[in-house]
Amino acid sequence: MVKKTEQDDFSLAERRRYDGIVQIQTMLADGYAQVQIKELLHTTYFRIRRYATGDPSKLCRFQGERKSGADRYKNTIIELLSKNMLKKHILEQVAGIGYRGKRTAFEAYCRKLINELGIPYIPRRNAMGIQIQQNQTKPVQHYVSASDFGRHLWSGKELETADIDYIISKYPRVEEIQQCIQDFRKIYEDKDTVLLNRFIERYSNSPLQPIKSFASGLRGDLDAIKNSVTSDLSNGFVEGNNNKIKVIKRMMYGRAKIDLLRIRVLYAR
């Protein structure tokens, strides 16, 4: 049979305090200065001095439960809670007969009484006149964010079929957006300029203004876009060098003229 020790009766909070006291006393016995203990344990000088000596098993004990100032008016509070009066109105009445505590402490005291005594406290009603329970939890809601659905359309992020069907039924134009994305991807997959012309012709009359503007804008630079469709070459290298030069210009702003700038650009290459 295992012998029961005094520490077995500790609460979780008392156990944490006990471990902290033992740690402080051990470090003091090992020769640590108070300033070192304060920094290592992230505590205060007051706490170090308070627990420097004494039996940790006794020092860690909580000295009984703290009484609330509202205890003097307990019967009155219980009576008013039973009548489903709002806590702020109960506080006004109790303050009128001498209570001087804070509102937050008073409301915590009321919640404690409601839970301990099982008072059927239902003071509030919603717009339909239905009483709202004190601890009524909100129903768990399932939703799909706009960013998640956007990733589904553009990158194929997996979503529940029921969610997709619901969104499409509620917003029918989503289907046109999805079809537009698929048609544009197919142009580059097949490297077909005929599909590009069909895309422009079809979506230039789209009822969705952003799609219509995009398709119409393709006409303005059609030759370059056709080149990007049919050619494997890219202007990424040129754009990368342009970006590098602009960065160097910003770094050199106000410090040098064109000669030094030219040297910095050549050196960067």
Image (cartoon, rainbow, N blue to C red):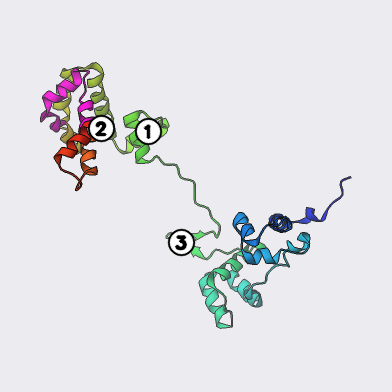
Q: Amino acid at mark 1?
A: Ile
Which of the two discs, 3 and 2, labels the residue nearer the N terminus?
3
Q: Position of residue 258 (x, y in %)?
A: 14, 40
**In terms of depth relative to the viewer, which is nearer, 69 or 77?**
69
The residue under label 2 is 268
Label 2 crowd bin: few (<14), some (14–19), many (20+), radius 10 Å: few
Quadrant hosting residue 105: bottom right
Q: Is residue 11 left or right of residue 2?
A: left
Q: Position of residue 253 (x, y in %)?
A: 20, 46
Q: CA distance from mark 3 to mark 1?
A: 36 Å
Quadrant for the N terminus in the image: top right
Q: Position of residue 149 (x, y in %)?
A: 35, 36
The residue under label 1 is 164
Q: Which residues are magenta?
A: 215-241
Q: CA distance from mark 2 to mark 1?
A: 50 Å
Q: Is residue 54 left or right of residue 143?
A: right
Q: Amino acid at mark 2?
A: Ala
Classify mark 1: helix, strand or loop: helix
Q: Which mark is residue 129?
A: 3
For the point 58% across and 73% down, the residue is 80
Q: Main secondary structure of the magenta part?
A: helix
